[in-house]
Image (tube, coloured by chain):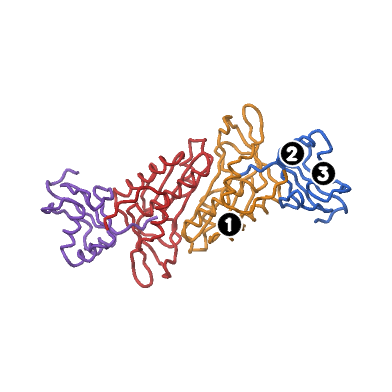
Chain colours: A purple, B red, C orange, D blue
């Protein structure tokens, strides 16, 4: 919940997803009907190409909402920062 | 500041000294240092890049340290994780835990590194003779974290 | 030399760097540092003297390191134990273990310090406001060592 | 097994026992009939005073023969270095 344009989402892509999507971030208008993390993932997968491949059901993708890992049914709200990334490999 | 994400190397002795300074009830310090191996899954690793998610990484590490502090009777804990370009044998991560007695320090230290490996938003990319590749998450890391029987992290896959 | 008994202090970073130098298969370093607490069993400790049995101490520590190496897939291990006069917050002992993966390093490190505390011929004498006293062996140390299910040490009592 | 006078034992006392006995070491002739660690302990306890007190049955005493912790029935042989000490407290 930041001080941003109303009805937008800030999307962040990291590591392999950043490379596959060719972008580290973007701002999009909150798509109609997208109220959950799972719905946002499906919306992005529908872009096709690398999006469809990387976000296909069964691919291991983690999604964080405002810096907290979120479950598929977690809500998505205007102003959220939503990050998509592969399973982590630090340490 | 109990967690740091930095490109610079760290001096283990200095960091552990600072961690236990000022509390002479400390009798035990357990530490873990992760280093860059030059071989991973049979490919020689020439160098490595650590990417992270600025903002979230610090919060995730602090949450892991807080969980350790609430679970064990420890005095303090520290996590330093490097990001950016690293070479074989370089230090990647330091976890240090101080306590009155050693059992708590060991358990909390191992807990922190196990959880860090499955929950902190950091990714390794290796440059090998066959090209660059993102390191795959290891099932054994999930198993190590599961031993501690915290609620499973949320999955979105 | 994987074990040392010395009066001088040690630099943890330098010792661990030397331990892992030359083997880039090392990905994990687990370490334990024991330090002098200023309070033990409710008495303030002004200083401490560590006595040992020269000749046997080095053999006992080497035997413990060998047992760890035969039991876990580790690269190397190090024990440094100080003797003589020590003050609160001083470092007493360093155990360092290197391995490819962290699980083995943690287990071997904890094993070594648990066994050291019950098998290496070293004794602590504390100087407190109420006078000097030899520290009593702790039953919890015997229990910690027993966890590893090595044959019980021989007892003559 | 060192190069020493025949039929002697080298005894070493450490920590609290060193203080209680007022000696850190001594060399004694192998006492007649002393062939085990337990027998040596009993022989020394028979000296009375601090010896009897510290080495009484039930007191926690560790005995090492030639730098190896030994069981009560372990043999004692001429030339052995035998150390008596309390349970260890290093680390």
Provide the secondary structure element on which disc 3 rests: strand
Give the residue number, with chain letter if any, for mark 1: C68
Measured in 3D between alpha carbons, the distance from the residue under mark 2 to the one under mark 1, in whole angstroms, is: 31 Å
User: Which label was assigned to residue D17?
Assistant: 2
Respond whether the residues carrying marks 1 and 3 are from the same subunit. no
Percent of width and height locating residue C31: 52, 50
Q: Position of residue B119 (x, y in %)?
A: 34, 52
| Residue plotted at (81% across, 42% down) | D42
The residue tagged 3 is D26
Quadrant (top left, top right, bottom left, bottom right) of the C terminus of chain C:
top right
How far separated are the C-alphas under marks 2 and 3? 13 Å
Q: Which of the two marks, 1 or 3, is nearer to us in this view?
A: 1
Q: Give A78 or B43, whichever is nearer the viewer.
A: A78
Image coordinates for residue A81, horizontal then vertical, percent: 21, 49
C146 left or right of B127 in image:
right
> Farthest residue in the bottom direction?
B130
């Amino acid at each position: 919940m930041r001080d941003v344009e109303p009805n937008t989402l800030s999307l962040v892509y990291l590591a392999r997803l950043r490379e596959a999507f060719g972008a580290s971030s973007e701002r999009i208008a909150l798509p109609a009907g997208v109220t959950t993390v799972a719905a946002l993932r499906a919306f992005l997968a529908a872009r096709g190409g690398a999006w469809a491949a990387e976000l296909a059901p069964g691919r291991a993708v983690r999604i964080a909402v405002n810096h907290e890992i979120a479950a598929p049914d977690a809500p998505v709200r205007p102003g959220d920062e939503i990050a998509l990334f592969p399973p982590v490999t630090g340490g | 500041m109990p967690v740091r994400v930095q490109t610079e190397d760290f001096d283990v002795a200095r960091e552990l000294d600072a961690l236990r300074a000022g509390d002479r009830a400390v009798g035990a310090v357990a530490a873990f240092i992760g280093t860059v191996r030059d071989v991973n899954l049979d490919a020689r690793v020439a160098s490595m890049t650590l990417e992270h998610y600025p903002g979230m990484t610090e919060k995730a590490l602090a949450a892991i340290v807080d969980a350790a502090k609430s679970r064990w009777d420890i005095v303090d804990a520290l996590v330093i994780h490097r990001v950016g370009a690293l070479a074989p044998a370089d230090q990647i991560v330091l976890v240090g835990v101080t306590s009155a007695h050693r059992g708590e320090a060991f358990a909390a230290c191992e807990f922190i590194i196990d959880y860090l490996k499955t929950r902190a938003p950091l990714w390794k990319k290796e440059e090998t003779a066959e090209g660059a590749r993102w390191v795959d998450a290891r099932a054994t890391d999930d198993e190590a974290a599961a031993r501690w029987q915290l609620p499973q992290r949320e999955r979105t896959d």
